[in-house]
Image: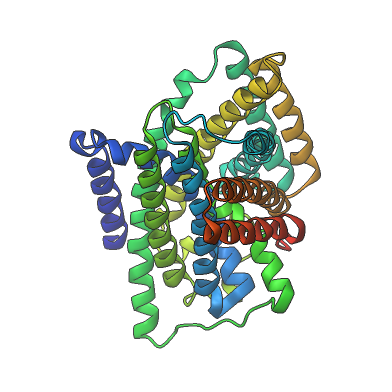
Amino acid sequence: MFLNASILAVVVGTALLLWSPKLRASIRWRAMTTPLASIIGSGFLVLGPILDESYGVYAPLVMAALCAAAYLFGSAIRYNIANIGDDDKSRSGTEERLETLSAALLGFAYMISVAYYLNLFGAFGISLTEVNDATNAKLLTSAMFVIILGVGWLQGFETLESMEYFAVATKLAIIMGLLLGLVVFLWGRASGGQLVFNQPQVSGWGAITLAFGLIVTVQGFETSRYLDETYDAKTRIASMKLAQWTSTVIYMVYILLLAYVFAPGDMKFSETAIVDMMKNVAPILPVLLVAAALAAQFSAAVADTSGSGGLIHELSGRRLSPRMAYALLTLVGLFITWNANVFQIITFASRAFAAYYALQALIAATGARRLGDAPKVWQFSALAVFGAAIALFGIPVEG
């Protein structure tokens, strides 16, 4: 009972801090909120069990590698933000064409990511009920697609988008409570000499390509690139860096606390395995995690649906309305939902975002060539090849 009360106190205290007027008035904090919400949204729910199950004792190293890869891709996007500035019109025709192709890829990636978010919503939504099975999860996911389409079709997402800060604050507050629970749990296991050092289930090229398929779990930093109507280039660059540093610290602490306390037999591996694992830590945590999952996945799905609709509207020369784009996204999402599992969707999304990052790196390399910055040309060209490799070779977790 004391641990439950302590976790709840940390959650409430963190929430009050995040809702403080002084913090919310900070321009840099507000600019960081969107990328941070995306980076630690769905990934936090699935990464721990995936890395623990697949990489065992080396899970923290893989987490560090994922964060490093994301930061490198972020460097290309930050270079593009600085290159464009706030009103720079000096980009070459090649850069503009690559940017158009990049936007199309991002719109497609958003379609898959909405399916990813809502499939997790469905899985977590029934995880603590007596109807917890794959079919019912897909039915709940399908219902959410229809609800989001209905709202977007009839009145747009302005009202729902106001949920973003609430979802971010809720999620961060619950994460702090979760970390407290894991610290206490780890201390108890260490004191009793019960730490576990699981052997990895994958190795070699298979381990690398599996990590490729997880890049979407640290995706989201690119949203800073598209906040130009609200923030200047300097603020967007700083917000992306701060969001990536903050999410890296959170992820690394989380994986370090999780990786050495659960033996393979302690959990049934699934997309909601974190809920079952946390039952062993503190009774209050599964309920809090489900609440965080539902708020985070719904707000993320709304944001990406809105973003995808806007991109498709612009790329079609305004011939395809945002409402028709929402309908297209719903059809694609329902098809994916009923023909793939969550782990396959994670890999599809990772490949789509990796292709987008490869193009952003290529744009950065092209801009660096125009500016005569030879070291950056080589750096971003190598990054573009790396992104293409992820897009080509990423494989799903065998859930």
Q: Where is residue 366 in the image (x, y as percent from the top left)?
A: 61, 47
Q: In this view, does 280 lie above or below 200?
A: above
* Residue lying furthest front: 372
- The quadrant of the picture occupied by the C terminus is bottom right
Count all numbered tags in the image, as a single digit.
0
Q: Where is residue 334 in the image (x, y as percent from the top left)?
A: 75, 33
- The quadrant of the picture occupied by the N terminus is bottom left
Position of 378 compared to 169: left or right?
Answer: right
Position of 198 compared to 338: left or right?
Answer: left
Residue 69 location, quadrant: bottom right
Residue 37 location, quadrant: top left
Seen at 42% across and 54% down, the residue is 244
Seen at 74% across and 43% down, the residue is 135
Res 263 seen here: no
Q: Where is residue 367 in the image (x, y as percent from the top left)?
A: 56, 45
Q: Which of 272 and 312 is in front in this view?
A: 312
Give the image's coloring scheme.
rainbow
Q: Nearer the viewer, residue 293 or 364?
A: 364
Seen at 23% across and 41% down, the residue is 16
